[in-house]
Image (cartoon, rainbow, N blue to C red):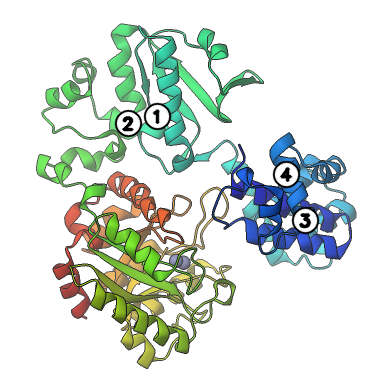
Amino acid sequence: MLNNKQIAGKFDLLAKLMELHDDNPFKIKTYANAYLSLRKLEGNLAEMSKAELASIKGVGSTVADKIKELVETGEMKALEKFREMTPEGIQQMLSIKGLGPKKVKQIWKEMEIETIGELLYACNENRLVAYSGFGPKIQADIIEKLEYFQASQGKFLYAHVHKQAEKCLELIQTKQTSTKIEICGDVRRMMPEVKGIELLSDAALVDIFPEIESMEYIDDQWYYMAIPIFIYVTESARFDQELFRLNCSESFYAAFSNEELSAGDDQMIFKNKGLPFIPAEFREHTDALSKNESYIQNLIEVEDIQGIVHNHSTYSDGLHTLKEMADYVRDSGFKYFVISDHSKSAGYASGLNEETVLMQWNEIENLNNQFAYGFKIYKGIESDILADGSLDYSDDILAGFDIVIASVHSVLNMDEEKATRRLITAIENPYTRILGHPTGRLLLARRGYPVDYKKVIDACAANNVVIELNANPQRLDLDWTWIPYALEKHVKVAINPDAHSKESIHYIKYGVAAARKGGLTKELCLNTMNKEAFDQWLSRK
Ligand SMILES: [Zn+2]
Ligand SMILES: [Zn+2]
């Protein structure tokens, strides 16, 4: 069944395709608006009646009919009509962030290019600059986007695969009870991006796949819920060793001798080497081999998280009110909550002007007085880092927040030197306590701006600023590979969900998974602090 985001996505594509084909601008606007209001809607669109659909703001009866059609038939005729008129490569270009219908139309109609490969070739031949609106800078930018698009093909977010992997394993096991099967590879190592579901088995499996619902066979490849399944078959005697190999990075695996590897299962392999057990997600860098048992046992776990930092409410672009968010966090067992709506320059996200900030502070104070049982809401803000590195409120307002998270949201097109300087200026601002999503990357969609990680982390160390590991599974930014350097410099890491709805606070688990890969311990995470320690940290700067 289609979820709201998928349904909304169809209207986005429809609007873009219609624009590409110079269709009626009023209709285009209707569908573009439908996309905007549907993508964040609560409730399940697929289960609503036509009347319910039509009553949604931004959805009239035309759009409601189309949703019904889509849910009932799996197709939208209007969309199919435009798709048929548009080459596949052109549709792919529309899905690339930053390539709008106007540019794609020029590429198609003026340059007569119809595939990503052709376009990349044309860019590399410097052909685009001959066309109006395509300077050398835009061309270079398009090259980067296309290369990223090509590299991301055949990759999925861990968050979108891990549950399916377990479900798939369970279904296979019920059909083939005597076979030894384990999830392995990318999913087992909790890589932020995975190539699909990888399974190790001691017997052939595909014979039973046709009996399993949701299994599909397309072009020599089996899929479970549209995710490719890679099956590695090994003889029973080598199963443990093979599983160990698949669950380690190459360099980590290379540190083991054949004799050590033949010891038995992974518990035995580590024991035989005289090492504490290292979980699969931490079998990345060989440095992990030098960690003692207490270090490994102190690797961060979801249960260690005491407070939820970096959240949005309806004051800016969140789905739930401040109170709904706070209640949910409290009822989920956490001890404190930092609200950090967008700041005033974030017009795209209804950022808060000074007056609204004061209103929010007032509401927080009232709520804190009611929650007189150890739960606290902190007055935070996600303050935009402007192009010159400054924050977008006066010092008076900044001083009134308990905590300022500084993040870049606009003018993302910067070279490394400029981006690094911009971040460092923000880090040096005396009010900044956390640097939010340091590179602005969106996995599988947008590479972050380039930064000199060492300089940024060094600046955090010098200014007592915490660096965020944004736990949204599409961000996971700071990249986990930089955690060891942050730890070396004693820079604490905050694992923050950047929640725009109540349920998204559980993104924390993806942040924790990435943090474990980088060897983050409880002690070096900011929000494992209890409320008293957190208060103390806030008061020190
Ligand atoms: Zn942000
Ligand atoms: Zn945010």
Q: How many marks?
A: 4
321 or 336, nearer to the observer: 321
Q: Secondary structure at mark 2?
A: loop
- Disc assigned to residue 68: 4
Earlier residue among tags 3 and 2? 3
Q: Secondary structure at mark 3?
A: helix
* Label 2: how many Cα within 10 Å (few below 14, some 14–19, many 20+): many
- Residue flagged by tag 4: what amino acid is it? Lys
Earlier residue among tags 1 and 2? 1
Which residue corresponds to the image point at 43% horizontal and 44% vertical from the top-left? 192
- Residue flagged by tag 3: what amino acid is it? Ser
Q: Secondary structure at mark 1?
A: helix
Tell us which disc is closer to us: 2 or 4: 4
- In which image quadrant can residue 428 be found? bottom left
Q: Estimate the spatial distance between the alpha carbons at disc 3 and disc 2, rounded to whole Å.
A: 54 Å
- Disc assigned to residue 185: 1
- Disc assigned to residue 248: 2
Which residue corresponds to the image point at 83% horizontal and 58% vertical from the top-left? 19
- Disc assigned to residue 61: 3
Give the side of residue 135 with respect to residue 151, left or right: right
* Label 3: how many Cα within 10 Å (few below 14, some 14–19, many 20+): some
Q: Secondary structure at mark 4?
A: helix
Verify CB contact (< 8 Å) between mark 4 and mark 1.
no
Q: Picture coordinates of residue 274 (x, y %)?
A: 10, 28
